[in-house]
Image (cartoon, rainbow, N blue to C red):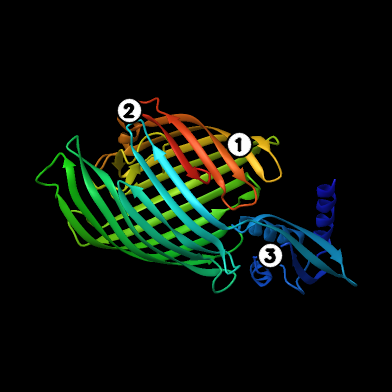
């Protein structure tokens, strides 16, 4: 009844918005999140026309912040044709450890352990880092401040040293290399409007490959150290709405990178992909979630192709980087159902299908339909969710392959898979 009344009042405001104005915007319920910051990113200001559609966009924007678990608004008459607008905020706990663990039936084991503050200085600045053990040790440090300069302009800085044991595929054989990537990245972040934003920047990195064991070929070096520059563009359309653990709406994120190289073995190349997300509420407890990734890169016949088939990235249960390609089509679809929901705790079940196919390095688009390249992994899982801690979603999924040469395995992690 309250929602219907608020909707009726909101429609009335919109109808008479030309004569009604905002006397003041007041923020309530926030403790760590700064009131000045909330006002800075809000479109409603004192003296502005009172418009319910603008207020509702502000509320959705607030609910997208990692520091906010829920938000709603109220409007009260002040005097004459002016009104006070109240934004009520329920905050998340935002100093969050992260843990990802993944295994397969080949006894592979890797983990990533991190710690991030998602509301640094009370201004929704994300700062933290992680340590990863995947045969070798890796680490990273990340800073992301989307509203650092204005309510539309910010920056991100990322430093990392990532070391893994990577398979390299050539002549129908495989070799394993110790791979290290040390990088420094600077990105400018700009928000055009409520739904559209862009990131633009550069990344300087060094790739080092050291042969460990497996097949060899005179044309494939056993040691390789290459300095590279990368130009990056990310464009995002976001129309998602959140209600605690439930998500609805559509999102599209396009990522394009151009990489220059100092080695003929790893020539200049481009890579681009687009992730499409579609979420739909089904009944009171159900949530249907979908992700489609379409990607292409330069099609050089190289064992170091950029798109990987990986347990923790696209196909749950498949293993850690079991293949590579220069093109990718991946579909992840899952049905999330809330089994138990208390004041702060949620137990959610999950049934999913992960499916994908890849273009071989130097191959053609017909590779996408070849049975050797198609992976289909249905599975089930569970989520333990804390509603008052940002991204406090402990997930466990079990994927079982049903296509040629399939494996099966468990994937543990913090946060939804997508």
Q: Is residue 125 positioned above or below 3 on the image? A: below
Residue toward you, 293 or 16: 293
Q: Is residue 199 positioned above or below 239 on the image? A: below
Q: State which mark lies toward you, 2 or 1.
A: 1
Give the mark nearest the N terminus, 3 or 2: 3
**Residue 16 x, y percent position in the rendering:** 84, 63
Q: Residues within 10 Å of mark 1 (few under 14, many from 20)?
A: many
Judge left or right: residue 177 versus residue 398. left
- Name the residue located 61 percent from the left edge and 60 percent from the top edge: 194
Residue 261 picture quarter: bottom left
For the question of whether residue 18 can be seen, the reply is no
Image quadrant holding the N terminus, namely top right
Label 2 to label 1, Cα distance in Å?
34 Å
**Residue 91 x, y percent position in the rendering:** 66, 58
**Residue 55 x, y percent position in the rendering:** 73, 61
- Name the residue located 51 percent from the left edge and 36 percent from the top edge: 333
Which residue is labeled 1 in the image? 348
Cβ atoms at labels 1 and 3 below 8 Å apart: no
Find residue 31 and name its label: 3
Residue 349 picture quarter: top right
Q: Quick one: SS at disc 2?
A: helix
Label 1 to label 3, Cα distance in Å?
29 Å
Q: Quick one: SS at disc 1?
A: strand
Cβ atoms at labels 2 and 1 below 8 Å apart: no
Label 3 to label 2, Cα distance in Å?
55 Å
């Amino acid at each position: 009844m309250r929602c219907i009344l608020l909707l009726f009042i909101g429609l009335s405001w919109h109808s008479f918005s030309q004569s009604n104005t905002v006397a003041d915007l007041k923020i309530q319920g926030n403790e760590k999140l700064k009131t000045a910051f909330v006002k800075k990113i809000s479109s409603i200001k004192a003296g502005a026309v009172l418009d319910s559609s603008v207020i509702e966009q502000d509320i959705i924007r607030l609910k997208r912040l990692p520091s906010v678990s829920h938000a709603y608004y109220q409007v009260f008459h002040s005097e004459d044709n002016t009104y006070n607008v109240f934004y009520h905020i329920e905050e998340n706990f935002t100093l969050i450890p992260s843990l990802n663990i993944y295994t397969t039936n080949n006894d592979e084991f890797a983990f990533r352990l991190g710690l991030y503050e998602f509301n640094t200085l009370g201004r929704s600045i994300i700062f933290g880092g992680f340590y990863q053990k995947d045969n070798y040790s890796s680490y990273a440090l990340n800073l992301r401040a989307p509203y650092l300069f204005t309510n539309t302009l910010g920056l991100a800085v990322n430093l990392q040293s990532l070391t893994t044991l990577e398979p390299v595929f050539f002549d129908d054989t495989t070799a394993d290399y110790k791979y290290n990537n040390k990088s420094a990245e600077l990105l400018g972040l700009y928000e055009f409007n409520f739904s559209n934003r862009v990131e633009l920047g550069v990344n300087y990195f060094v790739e080092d490959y050291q042969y460990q064991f497996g097949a060899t070929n005179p044309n494939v070096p056993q040691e390789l150290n290459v300095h590279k520059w990368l130009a990056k563009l990310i464009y995002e359309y976001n129309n998602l709405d959140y209600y605690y653990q439930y998500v609805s709406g559509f999102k599209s994120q396009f990522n394009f990178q151009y990489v220059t190289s100092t080695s003929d073995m790893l020539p200049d190349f481009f890579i681009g992909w687009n992730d499409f997300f579609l979420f739909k509420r089904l009944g009171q407890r159900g949530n249907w979630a979908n992700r489609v990734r379409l990607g292409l890169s330069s099609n050089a016949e190289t064992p170091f192709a950029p798109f990987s088939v990986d347990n923790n990235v696209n196909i749950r249960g498949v293993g850690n980087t079991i293949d590579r390609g220069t093109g990718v089509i991946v579909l992840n679809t899952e049905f999330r159902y809330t089994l138990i929901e208390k004041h702060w705790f949620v137990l959610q079940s999950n049934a999913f299908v992960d499916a994908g196919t890849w273009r071989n390095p130097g191959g053609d688009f017909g590779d996408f339909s070849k049975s050797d390249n198609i992976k289909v992994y249905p599975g089930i899982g569970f989520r333990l969710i804390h509603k008052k801690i940002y991204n406090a979603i402990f997930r466990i999924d079990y994927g079982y392959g049903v296509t040629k040469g399939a494996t099966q395995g468990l994937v543990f992690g913090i946060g939804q898979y997508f």
